[in-house]
Image: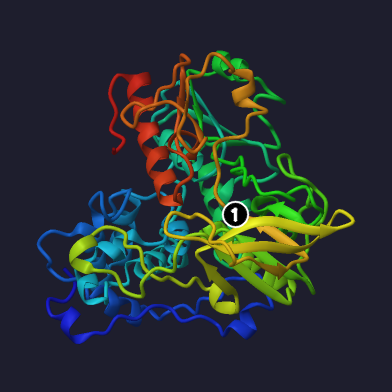
Amino acid sequence: MGKVTGFLEIDRQVGKYQPASDRIRHFREFTIPMSDQEVQKQAARCMDCGIPYCHGPTGCPVHNQIPDWNDLVYNNNWEEAIRNLHSTNNFPEFTGRVCPAPCEEACTLNLEDAPVAIKTVEQAIADKAYELGFIRPQPATVHTGKKVAIIGSGPAGMAAAQQLGRAGHEVHLYERESKPGGLLRYGIPDFKMEKNFIDRRVEQMTGEGVTFHCGVNVGVDVKVEQLLADHDAVLYCGGSETPREAGIPGVELAGVHDAMPYLVQQNRRVGRENIDSAGWPADPILAGGKHIVVVGGGDTASDCVGTAFRQGAVKVTQLDIRPQPPEKEDKLAVWPFWATKMRTSSSQAEGAVREFQVATLEFIGEDGVLTGVKCCEVDERRKPIAGTEFVIRADLAFIAIGFRGPFTDSVLQELDGKLTLNTDRRGSTNVVANDKDYKTSVDKLWTAGDVRRGQSLVVWAIREGRQAARAIDEALMGSTVLPR
């Protein structure tokens, strides 16, 4: 694959960032694109490794054929490269920007800490394909006469809609918010992925016959029962949006917020939309000139950090109850799986103070307004260590410790008692369906994405949407040519 000796001759290189002092002044993407020639050199590093773990279940949920399109890029065949990439992934420009790249962790060259720059090449293929006009609507040539409704236009819903539309079905995609995209548009900040990429896909899918219904909260504005009556199949892709309860005293203080209302508000501002949202509070939350504390160590917490810096925060402190991971993993113990090791996101690199193995004991305030966060160190079992308490000044605090399931005030409320749900030991509630046929306990209703598997990656949502589309097509038609 690529150049046989490329991995010996060419060093790993990925796109460089604008300096932090420059990029925190705007909400646009800040990765400096590499030239075609530089991308081709990186693709040339893909070695003939025998067993390419990068595109197996350990490396890529959608099973991207990574060695194949690396070879095509190396040989300057961009059109065939995007065709190959699209055969497994509907939206490579999304995953090329926001996926954490487990494929690179699984790369054989990662044994030497220099994996192929797979994510960089993937994004470059998609961007080059748009530049050259290779991405166009692909409407079905034969229509089946079947109607499918999809609830939720996040990555799972969009992927399923595109697959089912191309299979010849009449597809109607319902979105609670004013524009399509779900988490991609309203959860992920623009500095990680600008929203014109979603708009381009919506335009393509509209050209393929998909009808978008925005500003429609299914279960409230239109009943699920009505969709089931009017369509041959309904696919529920509502996402996992209910924040996990922190159980920390003082959460009622003014200045303490869950992470998502904060991120959704800023995304709506950048998109020139009113900050009022169907699912989130509308009081303005702004970090300018303030001391910020972010509780949580994941991607959502990191997004809060980057957003706060761009709004002009004085100081941002991020609290993680987990111990600080090692700088380097034991390759022989964990490869090709995702390793626990010290990782610094671009947002954290902009100046965040990171506190590890620290528990949040209480939000402290005066006259009902947040003034600080009381913390302490914890042991290996996450139990507080006596005598280690300290207080961090805070004008705003964001809780980013995960999500426990879909909103319960719409679809789940209407189908209460009819839809089988599963609650795990952490209190997360998901709709029950297997990953073979994706059928729920309600006739004609399928489900996919985070609402089924729990909070996860965009790439997993795309995979589930594609697989659910195949299952629906097979159920409606008796057979299917859609890939699994």
Is 235 or 314 nearer to us in this picture? 314
What's the residue at 46%, 29% (across, down)? 447
Is 316 on the left-hand or right-hand side of 368?
A: left
Q: Is residue 196 visible?
A: no
Q: Quadrant of residue 466?
A: top left
Is 478 or 351 nearer to us in this picture? 351
Is 105 on the left-hand or right-hand side of 161?
A: left
Is 216 on the left-hand or right-hand side of 231?
A: right
Q: Quadrant of the N terminus?
A: bottom left
Label count reads 1
Q: Residue furthest front?
A: 387
What's the residue at 43%, 58% (across, down)? 95
Q: SS at mark 1? A: loop
Q: Quadrant of residue 81?
A: bottom left
Crowd class of label 1 (few under 14; some 14 to 19; many from 20; radius 10 Å): many
Q: Amino acid at mark 1?
A: Ala
Q: Is residue 285 visible?
A: yes
Q: Quadrant of residue 448?
A: top left
Q: Quadrant of the C terminus?
A: top left
Is 89 or 30 nearer to us in this picture? 30
Q: Which residue is mark 1?
A: 400
What's the residue at 58%, 18% (across, down)? 415
Decide: is 162 above or below 343: above
Decide: is 375 above or below 251: below
* Image x and y of residue 217, in percent: 68, 31
* Image x and y of residue 114, in percent: 27, 77
